[in-house]
Amino acid sequence: MARLHFIILIFSSIFAISSSSFIRPPHPFDPLTRTELKLVRNVIKKTYPVGPKYNFTFQYVGLNEPDKSLVLSWHSSPDQNVKPPPRQAFIIARDSGKTREIVVDFSSRAIISDKIHVGKGNPMLTIDEQEAATELVHKFKPFRDSIRRRGLKLSEVVVTSSTMGWFGETKTERLIKTIPFYLNGSVNTYLRPIEGLTIIVNLDKMKVTKFKDRFTSPLPKANGTEFRFSKLNPPFGPALRNAVLFQPNGPGFKIEGHIVRWANWEFHMSFDVRAGLVISLASIFDMDMNKYRQVLYKGHVSEIFVPYMDPSADWYFITYLDCGEFGCGQSAVSLEPYNDCPAGAAFMDGIFAGQYGTPTKISNVMCIFEKHAGDIMWRHTEVEVPGLEITEVRPDVSLVARMVTTVGNYDYIIDYEFKPSGSIKMEVGLTGVLEVKPVEYVHTSEIKEDDIHGTLIADNTVGVNHDHFVTFRLDLDIDGTNNSFVRTELVTKAPKSVNTPRKSYWTTKQKTAKTEAEARVKLGLNVEEFVVVNADRRTKHGNEVGYRLFPGPVSGTLLTQDDYPQIRAAFTNYNMWITPYNKSEMWTSGLYTDRSQGDDTLAVWSQRNREIEKKDIVMWYTVGFHHVPCQEDFPTMPTLSSGFELRPANFFEQNPVLKVKPIKLTTTPCCTCTNG
Ligand SMILES: *[C@@H]1O[C@H](CO)[C@@H](O)[C@H](O)[C@H]1NC(C)=O
Ligand SMILES: *[C@@H]1O[C@H](CO)[C@@H](O)[C@H](O)[C@H]1NC(C)=O
Ligand SMILES: *[C@@H]1O[C@H](CO)[C@@H](O)[C@H](O)[C@H]1NC(C)=O
Ligand SMILES: *[C@@H]1O[C@H](CO)[C@@H](O)[C@H](O)[C@H]1NC(C)=O
Ligand SMILES: *[C@@H]1O[C@H](CO)[C@@H](O)[C@H](O)[C@H]1NC(C)=O
Ligand SMILES: [Cu+2]
């Protein structure tokens, strides 16, 4: 099935997916359309006053996750002639200082559920309210006086918004801290913080509720912060040649609505304002069985935890939970053809509701492309056959679904890479700009404190130490939903029953996790393999059909369990967890993350210690980075990547890409061809 398109380095074109005018019934996982978002607004307007004059704002609007059993029966019916599940929107609104959870049904065009959230934590911040808050601060007289007192020009000041976490307070109003930066000719905002100011805004009242000026600190120089190519001076380099794909028959993937088909893979790709890119119903075609087999019911980033390691007054609260506080979809950006995604990529837009319910578009927010990385899919040279030397080799090609979310200073590249061999690789790339602290030093020899909490990376500029923990929620359905999690320890043994000069060997010790407690994994403690198997299916040779997790580089939290940010992000206490499927357990930091108190995290759910053997189970995996900044991270940081891989393990009867056709170059590359 895996069909590889041959390539010649010449040129290519961009394939844009325009939602064509004919109407197809929505796929149960399709993101809410512009029309549906308008309908949501109209339905809610019948009950609540919506608009800038009133106290009613939309903080989250997304698809109300349809019942899994309904989706599965719809998906598995031939020609999908079973009725799709009811299509509904889930809305979190702020209504006069209270948080409301509303479900709107599209066929009845009515609110079918409406309740007030009484627990802890606040909904995601909207872009609009953050803008309103920062504008408010810009006009705030004491703030303007402070800026003038520092001898700075107000027109060059940019105010940004920061969540403030939770540090034991009993009242957790919707407050944010705002942090000012000084442009003064630079466009690299985050490298020029104006420190010493504490400015707190109450978002519900839209008022500055606290203002304090400690009037300290130098400002890092603007020199060297430029990153626009058009403004940089020669010499340029290192030189890179343009190398773009030429695919005479077009790219190898087909996109229908939000369904992507490529080689032996089929999956649905969606956009959510909180999660960003969502992959669902990913299945792989098995040539021997002549059918598609399920692998991943739904996969997406559930949270990104970024705690900074400077405990001082200006910094201690910087412990972001990006997706729950700012929205990893809301913060996603338009991708640039050829640079963000290579030639031949297809793009999809993202649509979400603004705070008064009006649809907003991020064009080209996700892309799909074939990746010809120059890797080898498999090979063998056989030299032992007398008189023959046989080489068989196939080049590797994969399909990547990508988004980039720019949460303030950082840009996160999130990739799902599908391989014809059945492997899926999740990769997180970090780039963007460091969060920095102004200091008086320009050389390490001048440092007087015992801890500057980072690295002096430029004049008067410390890149502050921090972590990035990106937690994926992966609802695996390996060949169906009846799955178990098997941990196989590799243990060293001394040979006993055989006569051998060897003193040691290793062998496997397998254990199926019965409950959630048995499936909490701290990587690096043991040599272990992790496989999700299907309890009902075995291969011809009797092995359990499964998918194995290959962890990437391992890093776990170094904060103590009683530290407030760690209580809120207790889902990073382990690298991996398994929970039984539960539609309400989607967001590892809790449904309400802003100022949360850690009572609704994955760690708390897992405490119930539910049974997970022969159940529909969900895997949670965290990709972690400890980031000690270095000078190369200034003024922008070259991408640092990490990730993990899910790979078939006794899922197929044999190598599923054995019969991929080798690539033969049949056309001579030329630049002046007229008849292609
Ligand atoms: C909005 O709600 C806040 C309380 O959160 C209240 O102080 C304010 O007066 C309300 N404004 C309007 C226009 O109702
Ligand atoms: C702002 O820019 C001007 C012109 O380049 C420069 O003279 C001045 O020192 C800058 N001020 C600060 C605080 O960086
Ligand atoms: C500004 O930075 C450039 C290199 O980025 C350096 O050559 C130049 O000397 C610097 N100028 C000042 C005034 O520090
Ligand atoms: C899961 O598989 C086991 C073993 O085949 C079987 O006994 C059990 O009934 C299955 N459960 C479901 C819900 O299908
Ligand atoms: C599903 O999760 C929610 C939130 O954690 C919980 O309240 C509910 O009891 C769970 N349902 C089941 C069946 O475990
Ligand atoms: Cu970092």
Image (tube, rainbow, N blue to C red):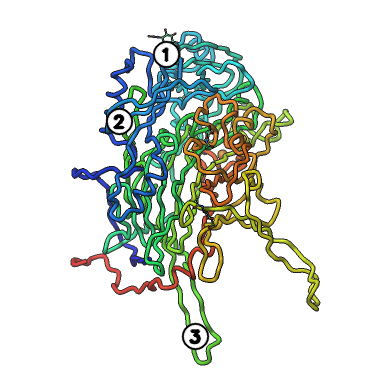
At a point 62% along the width and 18% down the height, the residue shown is 169
Q: Label 2, on which residue?
A: 37
Q: CA distance from mark 2 to mark 3?
A: 63 Å
Amino acid tagged 1: Ser
**Of callouts 2 and 1, which one flags the residue occurring earlier in the amino acid sequence?**
2
Q: Secondary structure at mark 2?
A: helix
Label 2 residue near ligand 1, CB within 8 Å: no
The residue that label 1 is drawn on is 96
Are the two marked residues, 2 and 1, in contact with CB atoms closer than 8 angstroms? no
User: In which quarter of the view is residue 317 placed?
Assistant: top right
Q: Is mark 1 within 8 Å of ligand 1?
A: yes
Number of the label disc, if any, that sits on residue 312: none
Look at the image and tell me in which quarter the C terminus lies. Answer: bottom left
Mark 2: give few (<14), some (14-19) or many (20+) Cα within 10 Å. Answer: many
> Which residue is painted at 37% across and 59% down in the image?
243
| Separation of residues labelled 2 and 1 (CA atoms) | 22 Å
